[in-house]
Amino acid sequence: MLDFRSIRFSFPGRREQVEVLRDVTFSCREDEIVAVVGPSGCGKSTLLSLATGLRTPTAGEVLVGGQAVHGQDSRLGMLFQQTTLLPWRSVVENVELGLEIRGEPRGARRSKALALMKQYGLAGFERKYPHALSGGMQKRAALAQTLAMEPKVLLLDEPFAALDAQTRVVIQNDVVKICRAGKRTMLIVTHDIAEAISMADRVVVLSRRPATIKEIFEIPFSRGAVSVADVPSMTEFATYFKRIWDALDISITGMGAAA
Amino acid sequence: MNAGTLHTVLVNLGRAAVLLVILVGTELGVRYGVMSQLFFSSPSEIFEALRTQLGQGTFLPNVGITVFETLLGLVAGSLAGMAVGLLLPQMRILSHVFEPFLMVLNGIPVIVIAPLFILWLGLGILSKIGISVYIVFFAMFIPVYTASLRLETTFVDALRVMGASRSQIFWKVVVPSSLASVYTGLKIGSGLALIGAVIGEFVASRSGLGHMILYASGTLDTPGLYLGIITLAVFAAVLSFAIDAIGPLLVRWRFADEK
């Protein structure tokens, strides 16, 4: 459904080209959740901006449903790390923003937005402004905004990093359920290994910059879990956590190591 | 009576007392020769000057002319400042070309620019409106321009991913996010609009409050001088109250849900 083929990406630095991605190839099947983990600053978020057409790869191509992506593609939806709800629009006006951009008539987009808000537990907050919502509800509203456009592929860029631990698990679970129910493809970029294992069917580990794929792990048990919250207590979880951690190759020296 | 209302009552009583002391003090001081009539005027003398000028039919036209110049200068200067401040950052090369010129123009004290406007636009109200527009333009342009340059890129990215065109991004993100700066510009501009009009009248004029003040000063008409200054102060205060009442409507969302 979503293919990254021999992706290279570099940008001009102060002295020389900064190479961010070096030959990254992997694909996400339909109805599959894939997580990308990697060391900080390795270029995992760049992958998403290449898929959404915000950036263009230096070499290689991104395909959606077999067709190369040129610029913006309505089959892709994205959930950002920071809030993207416009503070001067009420929550319902934010949820319908994508449909408004697409040119859907006022009545149709409003009723679609209201229905989605009800479904995602945002009823009663339609006329509020985003700053009146909790972090978790803002995320849900942003998700409703993205899903209102009915994308085939959902891209998530460290979307839950700013949430508190409990809210994060609840929202992770919601996102997985919504995604599975709609048979959507989902690509989530995260630095949180537990999040990757709990949500994804496969975990792609990137190396340090210039990033290449270090290893891809199949996570056979996450799909069977009743909820995302159950995954960390499964026996296989610790094994995979350790294997992914080792693949990331992050050295822990830090305090006391020198003494 | 709770502490809050007691506070308000005390503040208002205090303000009334200060005003009363000034009015009674100058009235008695001037009447009994403690304060020289050349330098000070009693409230009753100023009131008498007002009655005389109203009788001669010069007061209201003078006030009207300055009010007209100020309001027109404020509206036209603000609209021009907004338009350039919003559009210039959209064209990066033009913006880099014009930035230093605009900053240098902004640095010239308005008092030395005023004679040029008199030269170009004559002794009538047009030159005063011109000067007013000139300084209001910069009061509006600078905050709006700075805000458009520091636009939240996540908002722009989110809209681009949703497939928004450049003009959709302009109207749905750039313009609304500048409204807080428009409010700032209006606040500063409303004071400067009046300064511009009066400076123009000071340099060369046949009517207006500035002319009235200059004339009173030239003929050693101390009560007339005070009348002009007080009228100007009252108009400035009314204008500032009006902006404070209208301005928050521009950023309504900021004040919502806070009660």
Image (cartoon, coloured by chain):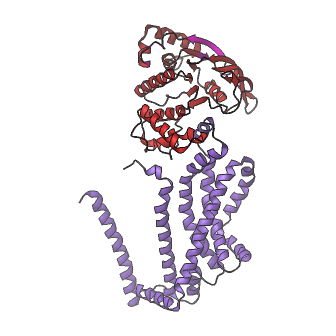
Q: Where is A237 relative to A125, above or below?
A: above
Q: Is residue A81 visible?
A: no
**Residue at 50 percent of width and 59 percent of height:** B247
Residue A113 at x, y percent in the picture: 49, 38
Residue B104 at x, y percent in the picture: 71, 60
**Residue at 36 percent of width and 86 percent of height:** B28
Q: Is residue B73 magenta?
A: no
Which chain is in red here? A
Q: In which quadrant of the rendered view does residue B71 lie? A: bottom right
Q: Where is B235 relative to A199, above or below?
A: below
Q: Is residue A139 left or right of residue B73?
A: left
Q: Is residue A72 left or right of residue A239?
A: right
**Nearer to us in this view, B188 or A50:** A50
Q: Is residue A65 left or right of residue A32?
A: right
Q: Where is B17 relative to A198, above or below?
A: below
Residue extending farthest to the left is: B1
Chain B's colour is: purple
Q: Is residue A209 magenta?
A: yes
Residue A194 at x, y percent in the picture: 48, 18
Residue B18 at x, y percent in the picture: 36, 73
Q: Is residue A150 visible?
A: yes
The segment highlighted magenta reads A204-227
**Nearer to us in this view, B41 or B236:** B236
Q: Where is B258 relative to A47, above or below?
A: below
**Residue at 65 percent of width and 27 percent of height:** A51
**Nearer to us in this view, B175 or A205:** B175
Q: Quadrant of the N terminus of chain A?
A: top right
Secondary structure predominantly adopted by residues drawn in magenta: loop
